[in-house]
Image (cartoon, rainbow, N blue to C red):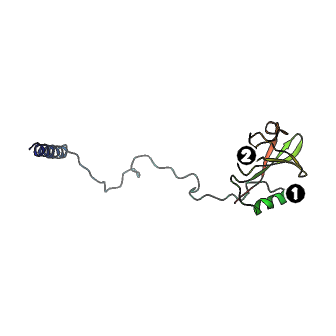
């Protein structure tokens, strides 16, 4: 009995809401004539100022330096290509450190030393990495004293 009363009351409320909302004089129309000013809101939309940017434009310049690399460095890059791709990818940068050009090779992963080479390919030190993340301690000032960073190579695979 109580359920039928609630159902009847709910139906009556819904009927009341629908009939009174229609009596408020709300009219929905779709305009068929074009606006007098030439635009719908009185404010025109400006023309685009640049080309379509949905399709990215490839950069013809490589992200790394294409300057002549020492032969020992080219061999090292070939060895990286022959090996399995590291995660994160290997990067090689050149810097000026203590007045000389040096080459910094990032580590492939997890607790490995990075390498710092002299211009002739001789290993100078390991500036970072290892279990402590601080390298071998032989060039602890490398991060503070290095200048003129250039990306020489990164593994594109």
In the structure shown, which secondary structural element does the residue marked by tag 2 occupy?
Answer: loop
The residue labelled by disc 1 is 72
Q: Is there any visible trace of residue 43 in the rendered image?
A: yes
In the structure shown, which secondary structural element does the residue marked by tag 1 occupy?
Answer: helix
- Marks 1 and 2 sit apart, C-alpha to C-alpha, by 25 Å
Residue lying farthest to the bottom in this orientation: 82
Residue 48 spot, x, y in % from top left? 54, 52
The structure residue drawn at horizontal position 83% and vertical position 56%, both measured from the top left corner, is 67
Residue 30 placement, left or right of 71:
left
Residue lying farthest to the right in this orientation: 120
Quadrant, the C terminus: bottom right
First along the sequence among labels 1 and 2: 1
Mark nearer the viewer, 1 or 2: 2
Q: Is there any visible trace of residue 69 in the rendered image?
A: no
Residue lying farthest to the left in this orientation: 1
Residue 6 placement, left or right of 151:
left
The structure residue drawn at horizontal position 80% and vertical position 57%, both measured from the top left corner, is 66
Residue 109 spot, x, y in % from top left? 71, 50
Residue 46 placement, left or right of 11:
right
Circles 1, 2 touching at the beta carbon (< 8 Å): no
Rate crowding at label 1 as few (under 14), some (14 to 19) or many (20 or more) other CA atoms within 10 Å: few
The residue labelled by disc 2 is 111
Residue 4 placement, left or right of 83:
left
Rate crowding at label 2 as few (under 14), some (14 to 19) or many (20 or more) other CA atoms within 10 Å: some
Q: Nearer the viewer, residue 53 or 138?
A: 138
Quadrant, the N terminus: top left
Residue 42: mark: none
Q: Nearer the viewer, residue 77 or 46?
A: 77
The structure residue drawn at horizontal position 80% and vertical position 61%, both measured from the top left corner, is 78
Residue 8 spot, x, y in % from top left? 11, 45
Residue 39 spot, x, y in % from top left? 41, 51
The structure residue drawn at horizontal position 58% and vertical position 59%, both measured from the top left corner, is 55
């Amino acid at each position: 009995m109580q359920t039928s009363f609630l159902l009847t009351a709910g139906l009556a409320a819904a009927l009341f809401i629908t009939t009174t909302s229609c009596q408020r004089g709300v009219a929905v129309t779709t305009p068929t004539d074009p606006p007098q000013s030439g635009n719908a809101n009185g404010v025109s939309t400006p023309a685009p100022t640049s080309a379509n940017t949905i399709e990215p434009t490839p950069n013809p310049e490589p992200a790394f330096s294409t300057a002549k690399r020492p032969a020992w460095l080219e061999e090292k890059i070939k060895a990286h290509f022959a090996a399995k791709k590291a995660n994160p990818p290997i990067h090689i940068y050149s810097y000026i450190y203590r007045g000389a050009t040096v080459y910094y090779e990032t580590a492939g992963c997890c607790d490995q030393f990075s390498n710092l080479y002299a211009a002739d390919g001789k290993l100078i030190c390991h500036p970072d990495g290892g279990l402590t993340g601080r390298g071998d301690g032989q060039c602890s000032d490398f991060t503070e004293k290095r200048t003129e960073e250039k990306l020489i190579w990164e593994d594109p695979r």
